[in-house]
Image (cartoon, helix red, strand yellow):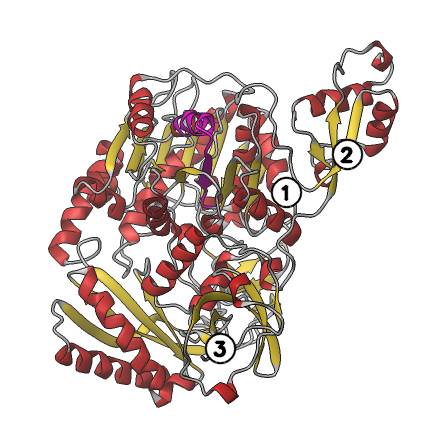
Amino acid sequence: MPAPILRLALPSPLRRLFDYRAPPGVPIAALQPGMRLRVPFGRREVVGVLVEVSGHSEVPADKLKAALELLDPRPPLPASLLRLCRWTAHYYQHSLGDTFGWALPALLRQGEPAERRQERWWQLAEGARPDDPRLARAPRQREALQALAQHPHGVPQAVLGKLQLNKASLDLLQAKGLLRSEVRDHAPRERHGGWLLQAELPLNDEQREAVEAVRAGLGGFNAFLLAGVTGSGKTEVYLQLIRQVLESGRQALVLIPEINLGPQTLERFTRRFNARIALLHSGVGDRERLDAWLAARDGEADIVIGTRSALFTPLKHPGLIIVDEEHDASYKQQEGLRYHARDLAVVRARQEEIPILLGSATPSLESLHNAHTGRYALLQLRQRAGHARPPRFLRLDVKSRPLDAGISPPLQQAIGRTLAAGQQVLVFLNRRGFAPTLLCHDCGWIAQCPRCDARMTLHQRQRELRCHHCGHAERQPTACPQCARVDLRPVGAGTERTEERLATLFPDYPVLRIDRDSTARKDALPRLLAIIRRGEPCLLVGTQMLAKGHHFPRVTLVAILDADGGLFSADFRASERMAQLIVQVAGRAGRAEEPGTVILQTHLADHPLLVQLAEQGYLAFAAQALEERRAAGLPPFAHLALLRAEAHRPGQAEGFLEQAGDEAQHLLDALPLSGIEVLGPVPAPMERRAGRHRAQLLLQATSRAPLHRLLGPWLAALERLPGARTVRWSLDVDPIDLY
């Protein structure tokens, strides 16, 4: 009888499994799908994941290599996550081994044991009280004891610094018998008291109906879309649902679009819940990430909060998935495994048989279409929480008006009045740097990126020109490289220039710039947000980082400097994104007692899209946009797969895509598939990027199923093409941009 064969998924772009013999001395009965093995692969050793044990192999027995080592006594990947990864690899036509690489923490990919580290934890001793008389003359010790009292499970050594706890103070408290410490490998299972540390806020009728609707769906798969205007209290709906999930003994997974929202979300959840909360995103260290991942898998984390990759966190007792700001493009992975975390979250919820709640003030057209067709239940929050009122929109026509660093005189006056009233102003410009163009006034030379078909942005403080597409940077020239004259002028405005000008116009008020450059240093964003939340009059200048999830109660004026940005883009999704961005930014205004105003600076004040947004709101825009998409046969009424190719030589990518298009047409002629069009190849909108020439081929289908029946054999044919090894190519299923 032939020896059983191990079929492993390896970290390789090849969309296939690899066969090995079992490691010496390891019985087949000890091997289960999801276990990791170290195996020889070419001239190196890699860590693979066991997918199945087979009775035969197409590789001759004498050519089969033996795996070197079994790394796990039990599978680190539970069966539910294995199933999700296999579905993901099949749907997105990606290597299963590489898909596991996205799902596993880095240390597990490297072969580290799937075990949590041991660490010292600090906890209040029984009967310890912050008003202990022995602390009357020890204010630091008293503050430390008060801080630890907020954490009934204890605090690990690694996070003492984040809580501003001094170990010397803790040692003194321990000597007095007020603290105890112990070495643990995880947070304790037992809890003290109920789930709530803070009372829940009262719900209005719409919030209560939303909570009741989702609560009725707990225990089985149901998909809900919570469309709530900005400031309507969507987070309170999330929190009260999570409390009910915790009370049922289950875990909650909360996805957020960006790392920057992690700390404030964690803070709000930590204040509310007496629960074990894990935070997972790319900014978390490898060891901390592995510990959180394992805690969630073993049921030791009650709530998991994270960005898109946290979707692959295993849960021992899953109860609810929440996707906040579900419309956000950050949920789409744009390199490697090009998955969409929102869509995969719905698949996971269906597989786990639990409800999922998608929330947004500006839902994606895909999600609204799913709600209109009955796939999702639509829940609406039409009014702001408390006594806050919707902001008032003003379209400010700046045609023929002088602009000072992008700021018109009427806007300057409105800013001055708001600051003088003791309130805060948010100035939005989705463009980093000082100026998007550097121009020679004498000969017309423009600073172009040598590697891209794009202009370089001037960052004046660093005296640097940067390409925001490929990262190329060079020193700002002192004279024109073309004519040697010195009259080089920055054209246009970015956040850096706007910040500088506002500081000159309003010298008595702080100007805080929030963009990727100003928040690059660790803890820079929390420090800026802390200043804003003090409530003193100030000016906030920033990009879309300011548009998401922030609550600034003293901001009563929002100014959008360039409201025309997405009106004439070649991308069919540009108007949707522009509408979402305007509404999200506008939502920062008037979130407390004072009414808010939004000023849209535009050269097209009568444009139908801007008029509709300002007067009727986002859902009215979305309804019209969906009808336009239906008439044009575009998503969500069509399904796309985009084949991208890039090469060092001009024409090489197009040549490969011509062959790819021919292969697709041959398959369409041979297979009983209809409703699929092959469009292209055409040059990419930015044809040269990072030194490579780029082109693309689009498959457009009226139905999803025929498209996916085509993709498998098509990619297998592409891998055999001679040009497949001379160009870099990738397939993007359900692309969110055609760039």
Q: Is residue 411 visible?
A: yes
Say if 29 sits above or below 296 in the image.
Answer: below
Q: Distance between the residues labelled 1 and 3?
A: 59 Å
Say which label, 1 or 2, has the lower sequence index.
Answer: 2
Q: In this view, does 235 lie above or below 344?
A: above
- Circles 1 and 3, Cβ within 8 Å, touching? The answer is no
Query: Which amino acid, mark 2?
Result: Glu
Residue 59 at x, y percent in the picture: 44, 85
Residue type at the position of mark 3:
Ala
Locate residue 533, reporting x and y percent.
56, 27
Residue segment shown in magenta:
237-257
Q: At 45% from the left edge and 63% from the top edge, which residue is drawn?
A: 99
Q: Is residue 455 visible?
A: no
Q: Name the residue under label 2.
A: 182
Which quadrant holds residue 357? top left
Q: In the rendered image, which quarter contains the C terminus? A: bottom left
Mark 1 or mark 2, which is nearer to you? 2
Task: Give the CA distance from mark 2 to mark 3.
Answer: 48 Å
What amino acid is found at the position of numbered circle 1 in the picture? Ala
Q: Does residue 284 sit above or below 254 in this rendering? A: below
Q: Nearer the viewer, mark 2 or mark 3?
A: 3
Distance from Cα at disc 1 to Cα at disc 2: 34 Å
Specify whether 602 is left or right of 552: left
Give residue 184's mark.
none
Question: Going from the N terminus, do you reach mark 2 or mark 3 first?
Answer: 3
User: If the image is split into quadrants, where does the N terminus sit?
Assistant: bottom left
Q: Name the residue under label 1.
A: 524
Tell me the crowding category of disc 3: few under 14, some 14 to 19, or many 20 or more residues within 10 angstroms, Cα based.
few
- The residue beneath circle 3 is 3
Q: Residue at x 20, y 62 (%)?
A: 705
Q: Where is residue 265 in the image (x, y as percent from the top left)?
A: 52, 35
Badge 1 local density, few (<14 within 10 Å), some, or many (20+)? few
